[in-house]
């Protein structure tokens, strides 16, 4: 990626996480949102009333639009939570809590 | 800007009680102006939980008013539709220990005799009623008549349904009287409104309004915080609280009391409220008060431990020294009627109160004996 | 943990204050939500990315290095304790305790499940700001991000929102965001600025207070040219298109009043839109402490003191003015705190340069405010179907109905009657939008919890062991 080149980045070894069962590659230091963006994914939540897709809005933890379920914990802000090897990331539907 | 208005009755206070007074007065054929210094539901109504409870009331005049009101609420809910988020969900009062359960059973027996429907729930059946309740509770009582509305929406829709003229953002500065003391109307910061009758539905500020008419009504504020969680699926089905809540409501102590009512809402969040403190009109946030709410709620529902509180709001519940509201004509000022001081029960008691006031305004006989609610009942004590 | 001074926020203001106070013998605890110090302005690529040119996406990197070295020195000497990943949810004035007894309540780590408490004699609120975004049809589509959000993701993760981006809105942030994205290899299809450049010219005197800034802006201009970025001034995005994700935007030209000129709309294909309409201060901690907040900013005196004894504030929280102003304010706050904690008055002579710099930068910030006003009449573009409150999915039509039919005339009543602002973000994103659509002035919203806090944490008063 150009931005990595721009910062002359030499990241540590990439690792794998899954998003809705699909394997995607992540770099150490990335948040869940960064890993998803890098994989071309822009939405990972559906709203609780209308089921509309949402992803990053503010990118700094203020707007809570990027809520996602990581390793069965719902309502994690993808823009704050670091991606870790083996993370199971799932699209969060509604409140994120099972009925 | 100054304008002159004339109508049959001025209702002061566009909270739930004022809205109900306006509705029933208008339905009795009166021309009503509803005046508030703020917006609709700007005071206690907008800071409440919307409890329509019989479960917390001991046999007596307040319980009779509550039962009367619940009937009216059911009619209003049908009329206004889903917009007011009315839910006849029922209440569950639980006791942690056997002694508490005995006391709760005795209390419920008294209520039953007064016309309340109560269903005893044995310890091993509590989780059928409320699956997420803490283990090890001694038992409880189910009150199917307890209900809930969204109070601000309810007030706003009642005002709209009443067809009354809503004059918000207008402060009543004085109840105007003739030299002989009879009501002439009100003076506001934006002109005079003439009317032969004025209803004091000013809630926590009802004492101040009464004072402008030259009468004493010792309404005092009791501060209450409510906690609101993140949205959840419906995990708390009823209004649930521990048996000591009833003792709190009736308490005279100034110290902080919390035995929170926990309930789910149509919108998703769980509401936890309310603390009760006598600290005047102090609007500052109190971490100890909301901590106590959180502690009480997580004791009842351990799953709430990891659920997040998103916000907390506070309001002032208007109460009178004997914890009964003032409802009725004020014999000291002909034409002045009071409908305030409902403490934490105003949403539930509002339709009944409005209905009774409208009956008085149109010269009819009220459905309930208003003697216990007489506004002048604190006269002697003052001397 | 006990400390003389708890500084909340490790951005420019917090860092400058911490360094100034520590240099004068104050024991400082720097409490910050980020994994690294620096705040949003000096956000660096995460360590794991091994960036050998971390400053590539920054300007004023030298200032940052100086701050970082100072911080490291004070940490090594034990004068500053830096608590990273500490998300403060409430600052409590402990009544019944001695005056100057504050408890800073935080949640640990990105998970924010476990509590931590710092007890302090004095508190500096350097909580920064966040971006204002005004709604328009389609703004909830994935691919629409705030300009600051795009920048944060780029600075911290070296990732971009898409291949082809439009940068839009108003304000000085749009330039660095557009150049940053372009430098990172994204095609910037257009930079759409609603402000009229003549307003900028009219502010020449105020802007001249900071000649360095003009050079900086010119630098961005050159880079935009180099990347062949189309710049449209007096234009706005009227709609974002797509189903499921963004596929393009319609932009239109504005007349002198800020109204969209009919028939000027044209479509620009893009897969992402970075949009922002200026910055808003984070004031909730101050509000809960009872500090005076005027027009959305924490009110402070010459020494950066709030009207609550023992509480200082600096940086964007006291009014948005950029990193340079935050540094000056933080420095002055740190000096004041060091003096006041020993019962002395700050040495005015020593703070003269910072005070002069603060004055000039405030003039500059005011000039920018005037040059980049939020677009007038923006609410006219918000159709009834447009969601204004993203969390609770409240549409503009519901807000208008609450005003028209239900007697709401202020933001609080609109909120009560529509749920706009009651969701996860507590109205931070939709506050200005709801007020604008309702046609009423914004009011202070009280948010006793600066961030959501688990009830289990709230339920337990932390024991002395944790304090």
Image: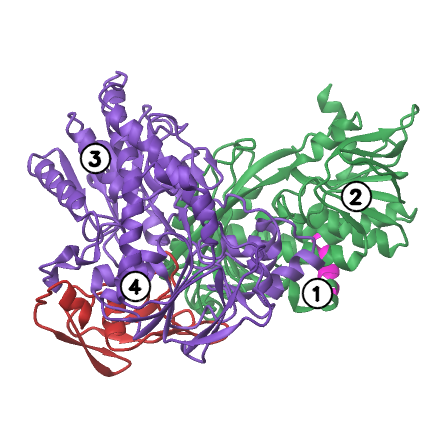
Q: Which residue is mark 2?
A: B11
Residue sticking out furthest to the top: C344
Q: Which residue is mark 1?
A: B77
Q: Is residue C298 left or right of residue C109?
A: right
Asked whether the residues under marks 1 and 2 belong to the same chain, the reply is yes
Residue C318 seen in the current view: no
Per the rendering, the colour in which chain A appears is: red
Asked whether the residues under marks 3 and 2 belong to the same chain, the reply is no
Residue under the image location 54 percent in, 44 percent down: C443
Name the one closer to the observer, C251 or A70.
C251
Q: Which residues are magenta?
A: B66-75
Question: The residue tagged with tag 4: helix, strand or loop?
Answer: helix
In space, the residues marked 1 and 2 are separated at their CA atoms by 23 Å
In space, the residues marked 3 and 2 are separated at their CA atoms by 57 Å
Disc 1 and disc 2 in contact, CB within 8 angstroms: no
Residue sticking out furthest to the bottom: A22
Q: Which residue is mark 3?
A: C18
- Using a 10 Å C-alpha cutoff, classify the residue at mark 1 as few (fewer than 14 neighbours), some (14 to 19) or many (20 or more): some
**What x and y, as percent, mark residue B116?**
66, 58
Residue under the image location 45 percent in, 33 percent down: C292
Check the residue under mark 1 and report the chain it is in: B
The dot on residue C225 is 4
Of marks 1 and 2, the one in the foreground: 2
In space, the residues marked 1 and 3 are separated at their CA atoms by 58 Å
Q: Quadrant of residue C219?
A: bottom left
Q: Which chain is purple?
A: C
Asked whether the residues under marks 2 and 4 belong to the same chain, the reply is no
Name the one closer to the observer, C377 or A55.
C377
Q: Magenta span has B68?
A: yes
In space, the residues marked 2 and 4 are separated at their CA atoms by 66 Å
Disc 3 and disc 2 in contact, CB within 8 angstroms: no
Question: The residue tagged with tag 3: helix, strand or loop?
Answer: helix
């Amino acid at each position: 990626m150009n931005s990595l080149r721009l910062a002359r980045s030499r990241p540590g070894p990439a690792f794998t996480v899954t998003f809705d069962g699909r394997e995607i590659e992540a770099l150490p230091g990335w948040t869940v949102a960064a890993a998803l963006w890098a994989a071309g994914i822009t939405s990972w939540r559906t709203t609780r009333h209308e089921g509309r897709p949402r992803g990053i809005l503010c990118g700094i933890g203020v707007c809570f639009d990027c809520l996602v379920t990581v390793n069965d914990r719902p309502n994690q802000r993808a823009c704050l939570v670091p991606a870790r090897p083996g993370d199971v990331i799932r699209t969060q539907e509604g409140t994120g809590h099972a009925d | 800007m100054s304008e002159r208005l004339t109508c049959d009755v001025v209702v002061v206070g566009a909270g739930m009680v004022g809205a109900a007074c306006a509705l029933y007065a208008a339905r009795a054929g009166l021309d009503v102006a509803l005046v508030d210094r703020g917006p609709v539901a700007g005071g206690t109504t907008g800071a409440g939980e919307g409890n329509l409870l019989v479960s917390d009331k001991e046999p007596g005049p307040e319980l009779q008013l509550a039962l009367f009101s619940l009937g009216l609420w059911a009619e209003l809910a049908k009329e206004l539709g889903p917009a007011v988020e009315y839910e006849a969900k029922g209440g569950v009062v639980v006791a942690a220990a056997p002694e508490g359960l005995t006391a709760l059973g005795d209390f419920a027996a008294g209520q039953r005799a007064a016309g309340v429907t109560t269903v005893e729930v044995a310890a091993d059946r509590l989780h059928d009623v409320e699956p997420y309740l803490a283990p090890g509770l001694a038992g409880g009582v189910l009150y199917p008549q307890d209900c809930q509305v969204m109070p601000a929406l309810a007030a706003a829709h009642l005002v709209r349904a009443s067809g009354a003229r809503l004059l918000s953002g207008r402060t009543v500065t004085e109840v105007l009287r003739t030299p002989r003391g009879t009501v002439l109307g009100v003076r506001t910061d934006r002109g005079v409104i003439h009317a032969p009758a004025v209803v004091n539905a000013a809630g926590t500020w009802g004492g101040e309004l009464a004072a402008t008419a030259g009468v004493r009504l010792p309404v005092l504020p009791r501060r209450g915080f409510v906690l609101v969680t993140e949205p959840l699926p419906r995990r708390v089905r009823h209004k649930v609280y521990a048996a000591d809540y009833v003792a709190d409501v009736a308490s005279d102590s100034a110290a902080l009391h919390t035995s929170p009512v926990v309930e789910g809402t149509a919108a998703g969040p769980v509401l936890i409220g309310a603390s009760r403190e006598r600290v005047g009109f102090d609007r500052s946030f109190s971490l100890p008060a909301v901590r106590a709410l959180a502690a009480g709620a997580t004791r009842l529902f351990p799953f709430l431990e990891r659920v997040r509180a998103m916000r907390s709001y506070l309001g002032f519940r208007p109460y009178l020294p004997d914890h009964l509201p003032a409802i009725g004509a004020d014999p000291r000022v002909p034409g002045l009627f009071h409908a305030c001081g409902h403490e934490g029960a105003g949403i539930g008691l509002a339709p009944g109160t409005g209905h009774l006031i409208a009956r008085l305004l149109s010269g009819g006989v009220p459905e309930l004996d208003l003697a216990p609610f007489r506004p002048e009942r604190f006269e002697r004590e003052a001397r | 943990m006990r400390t003389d001074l708890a500084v909340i926020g490790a951005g420019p203001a917090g860092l400058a204050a911490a360094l100034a106070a520590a240099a004068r013998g104050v024991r400082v605890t720097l409490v910050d939500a980020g994994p690294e110090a620096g705040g949003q302005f000096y956000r660096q690529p995460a360590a794991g990315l091994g960036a050998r040119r971390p400053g590539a996406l920054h300007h004023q990197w030298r200032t940052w290095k100086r701050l970082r070295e100072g911080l490291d020195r004070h940490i090594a000497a034990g004068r500053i304790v830096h608590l990273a990943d500490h998300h403060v949810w409430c600052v409590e004035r402990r009544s019944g305790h001695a005056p100057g007894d504050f408890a800073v309540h935080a949640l640990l780590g990105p998970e924010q499940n476990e509590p931590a408490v710092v007890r302090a004699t004095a508190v500096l609120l350097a909580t920064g700001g966040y971006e204002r975004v005004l709604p328009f049809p389609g703004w909830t589509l994935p691919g629409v991000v705030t300009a600051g959000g795009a920048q944060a993701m780029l600075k911290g993760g070296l990732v971009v929102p898409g291949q082809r981006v439009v940068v839009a809105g108003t304000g000085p942030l749009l330039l660095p965001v557009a150049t940053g994205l372009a430098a990172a290899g994204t095609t910037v299809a257009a930079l759409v600025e609603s402000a009229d450049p003549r307003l900028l010219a009219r502010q020449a005197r105020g802007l001249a207070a900071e000649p360095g800034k003009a050079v900086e802006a010119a630098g961005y201009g050159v880079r935009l040219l180099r990347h062949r970025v189309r710049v449209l001034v007096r234009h706005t995005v009227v709609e974002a298109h797509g189903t499921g994700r963004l596929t393009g935007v319609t932009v239109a030209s504005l007349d002198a009043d800020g109204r969209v000129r009919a028939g000027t709309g044209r479509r620009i294909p893009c897969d992402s839109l970075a949009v922002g309409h200026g910055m808003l201060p984070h004031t909730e901690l101050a509000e809960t402490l009872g500090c005076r907040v005027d027009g959305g900013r924490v009110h402070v005196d010459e020494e950066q003191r709030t009207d609550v004894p023992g509480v200082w504030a600096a940086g964007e929280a006291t009014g948005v003015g950029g990193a340079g102003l935050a540094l000056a304010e933080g420095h002055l706050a740190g000096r004041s705190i060091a003096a006041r904690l020993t019962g002395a008055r700050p040495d005015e002579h020593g703070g003269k340069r910072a005070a002069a710099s603060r004055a000039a930068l405030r003039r500059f910030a005011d000039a920018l405010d005037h040059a980049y006003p939020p677009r007038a009449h923006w609410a006219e573009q918000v159709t009834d179907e447009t969601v204004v409150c993203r969390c609770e999915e409240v549409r503009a039509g519901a807000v208008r109905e609450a005003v028209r039919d239900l007697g709401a005339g202020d933001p609080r009543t609109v909120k009560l009657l529509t749920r706009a602002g009651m969701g996860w973000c507590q109205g931070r994103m939709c506050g200005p939008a709801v007020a604008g659509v309702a046609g009423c002035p914004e009011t202070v919203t009280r948010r006793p919890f600066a961030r959501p806090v688990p009830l289990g944490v709230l339920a337990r008063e932390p024991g002395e062991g944790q304090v």
